[in-house]
Amino acid sequence: MKKLSLVFLGAPGAGKGTQATKICEKYNIPHISTGDILRANIKAGTPLGLQAKAIIDKGQLVPDEVVIGLMKDRLAQEDCQKGYLLDGFPRTIEQAKALDTFENVSMAINIAVNEDEVVERIAGRRMCTCGESYHISTYKADTCAKCGAKLYQRDDDKPETVKARLEVYNKQTAPLIEYYGNKNILYTVDGSQDINDVYASIVKVINDNN
Ligand code: AMP
């Protein structure tokens, strides 16, 4: 198999993070989520975190140059040399073009879910600082099954911010579907299926095409 340089596309709540965790485990590649990196910076109170918090809480995007610099450094690290999965980056055409200057993306996998469903999923999403996420309809405990920490709702998962995030997605991120389609490296899976079926669809796409 060639170097797996994967990009996950999909609206907020489509299941990118959940699937990324499973796919990275299977193919033994690092899961690189710009959202997780930014949230870790917020938690640690770094200058980047302070800058990012106000933007994230409004459902807007952190400036391109900030995330591009962050990802350029991250992708240059040793653990990325055999492949990686990008979750939440690129999120604009500008970011995708920048990524093309320092990396060769092998596949962009779009996890397609309709908007009503993502709204419902986000409303019930509960997170753990270890990266796990759950939905209140299927998980009733308030602590993480993996690490035992207390679960929380992301500030930007509250309804007033979700609307802004979906608008930003439709305007700034959805055009990436065409961008990668034009490069003939776009693969779409039906993200409305059960988690294990979405996972199986992604594995099939990767094994058939890489
Ligand atoms: P996520 O966890 O991917 O939903 O990201 C949470 C928030 O972090 C987004 O709503 C943005 O405010 C910010 N963010 C994450 N990735 C990016 C990116 N590639 N470009 C700009 N902002 C980002």
Image: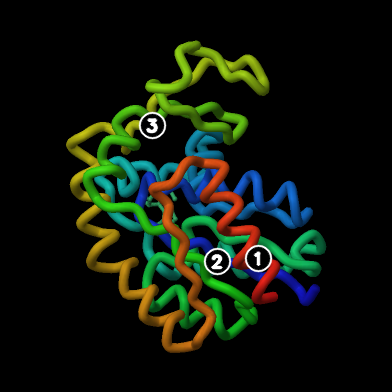
Q: Which of the marked residues, 2 or 1, is nearer the chain's N terminus?
A: 2
- Which image quarter: residue 32? bottom right
Q: Which mark is residue 7?
A: 2
- Which image quarter: residue 168? bottom left
Q: Is residue 78 visible?
A: yes
Q: Which of the marked residues, 3 or 1, is nearer the chain's N terminus?
A: 1
Residues packed near mark 3 inside 10 Å, few (<14), some (14 to 19) or many (20 plus)? some
Residues packed near mark 2 inside 10 Å, few (<14), some (14 to 19) or many (20 plus)? many
Q: Quadrant of the C terminus?
A: bottom right
Q: CA distance from mark 2 to mark 1?
A: 17 Å
Mark 3 and ligand 1: say if the CB distance to the nearest ligand atom is below 8 Å. Answer: yes
Closer mark to the observer between disc 3 and disc 2: 2
Of residues 24 and 138, the one nearer the viewer is 138
Amino acid type of the residue tagged 2 in the rendering: Val
User: At x 63% / y 62%, what residue is drawn?
Assistant: 204
Query: Which percent across, then down, holds residue 137?
Result: 38, 22
Q: Which mark is residue 154?
A: 3
Q: Which of the marked residues, 3 or 2, is nearer the chain's N terminus?
A: 2
